[in-house]
Amino acid sequence: MSDTRKPLDLFWFIPTSGDGPYLGTQDRHRPAEFRYLREIATAVDRLGYSGVLLPTGRGCEDAWITATALATATERLRFLVALRPGVATPAFLARQAAALDRISNGRLLLNVVVGGDPAELAGDGVFLDHDTRYAQAAEFLTIWRRLLAGETVDFDGDFLKVKGGKLSFPPVQRPHPPLWFGGSSDAALDLAADQVETYLTWGEPLDQVAGKIEAAKARAAARGRTLRFGMRIHLIVRETEEEAWRVAERLIRDVSDDAIAEAQKKLADGSDSVGQKRMSALHGGRRDKLLVGPNLWAGIGLVRRGAGTALVGDPETVAARLREYQALGIEAIIASGYPHLEEAYNVAELLFPALGIGGEQAGAHELHPGEFGTGAGRPKLTAVS
């Protein structure tokens, strides 16, 4: 059992594909305009979140360019940016990582994304099957890590070949900006055990998360390594339990049965991700099967791929549920809520005190997990065109 007295490392989400208060509709939709993304980032930086995740995919603004721009507008916020082994060379992405780490003064984290949508991958020029993608990613990360560590690299693998590779400008964080990664298949667990520092899971029921953590721990231990663990989940927090559930139901009020059926078919037919299949299996596309654990609601996954669950409730209840995951070994939470600007404030104002985030942490400038304090009060909210 892990120590649940330690503050969780709480991240937020930058919605680079757009935002809004409802799923399944364009009603009150907010486009991914940079001024809006910057508004979220500066608010989250001031409120005391540890960092932000920027998603990746053809429906999102580029994570690297967006993170670089946001890094210049923030002071302490860390940026978890997608490192995609199949779409560029290790040397090219090593140079990008080193540059962004220097620009941000050591605030870069890398989220290794192998990909689970064959059609989208084909559009990026990647035509490898599921397990082969992970084998290629292992070679990529081996080269990438050696370059960031300052080595001159010669490598001749099944997929990649490098001769005399080197990096002229080192990163701030040594030997390299930390690698985070999530995946549920055997191939993914092997990659995590071999290559990364933090293993991520989506917000599944406690027993399922416990099983994934133990499997990842065992594989890492067999290689003489240890892993840190994090979880990606949505949060719907209000002063009362009843109000929080009303907000959850309102979020999907415009989602029709036809839209659910279409989304679930697309997820089933268009993804070879084991993690996505686990998410979809929690509810089976049924509105009457959305409560999949205590306060764990799967309504978001009816129409959204990826993280599809939310913890719903009052601050004390949601904090208690997060502590249950923390007891399993989860140290970092990557959270989100719709719309992301307002919900960043709701979570900070309501949940942070219940989790012990803030207080004497305020004003901290050291770039360590969970050591960022709450900042000044709520600014005026700017309208988004």
Image (cartoon, helix red, strand yellow):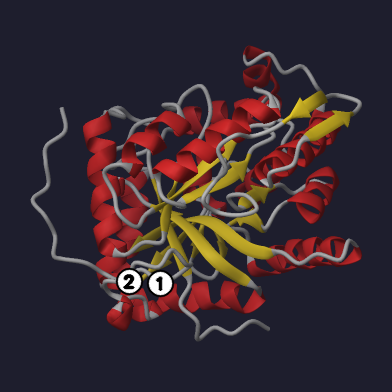
Viewer-proximal residue among 2 and 174: 174
Q: Residue at x 65, y 73 (%)?
A: 329
Q: Amino acid at mark 2?
A: Ala
Q: Residue at x 62, y 49 (%)?
A: 176
- According to the picture, the residue beneath numbered tag 1 turns out to be 371
Image coordinates of residue 88 in percent, x first then y, are 65, 23
Q: Residue 217 vs residue 88: left or right?
A: right
- When the figure is inspected, residue 267 is found, relative to residue 219, above or below; the finding is above
How many marks the image carries: the answer is 2
Of circles 1 and 2, which is in front?
2
Image coordinates of residue 337 in percent, x first then y, are 36, 51
Is residue 248 among the parts visible in the rendering?
Answer: yes
* Quadrant of the rendered image containing residue 82: top right
| Inter-mark Cα distance, 1 to 2 | 6 Å
Q: Amino acid at mark 1?
A: Glu
Q: Residue at x 36, y 68 (%)?
A: 372
- When the figure is inspected, residue 113 is found, relative to residue 270, above or below; the finding is below
Residue extending furthest toward the left: 380
Viewer-proximal residue among 218 and 87: 87
- When the figure is inspected, residue 334 is found, relative to residue 253, above or below; the finding is below
* Quadrant of the rendered image containing residue 137: top right
Q: First in sequence: mark 1 or mark 2?
A: 2
Q: Residue 326 vs residue 45: left or right?
A: right
Mark 1 and mark 2 in contact? Answer it, CB < 8 Å.
yes
Q: Which mark is residue 326?
A: none
Q: Which mark is residue 364?
A: 2
Image coordinates of residue 196 in percent, x first then y, are 71, 52
Image coordinates of residue 351 in percent, x first then y, are 34, 72
Q: Callout 2: few (<14), some (14-19), or many (20+) C-alpha neighbours within 10 Å?
A: some
Q: Callout 1: few (<14), some (14-19), or many (20+) C-alpha neighbours within 10 Å?
A: many
Is residue 28 among the parts visible in the rendering?
Answer: no
- Helix or strand or loop: what does disc 2 sit on? loop
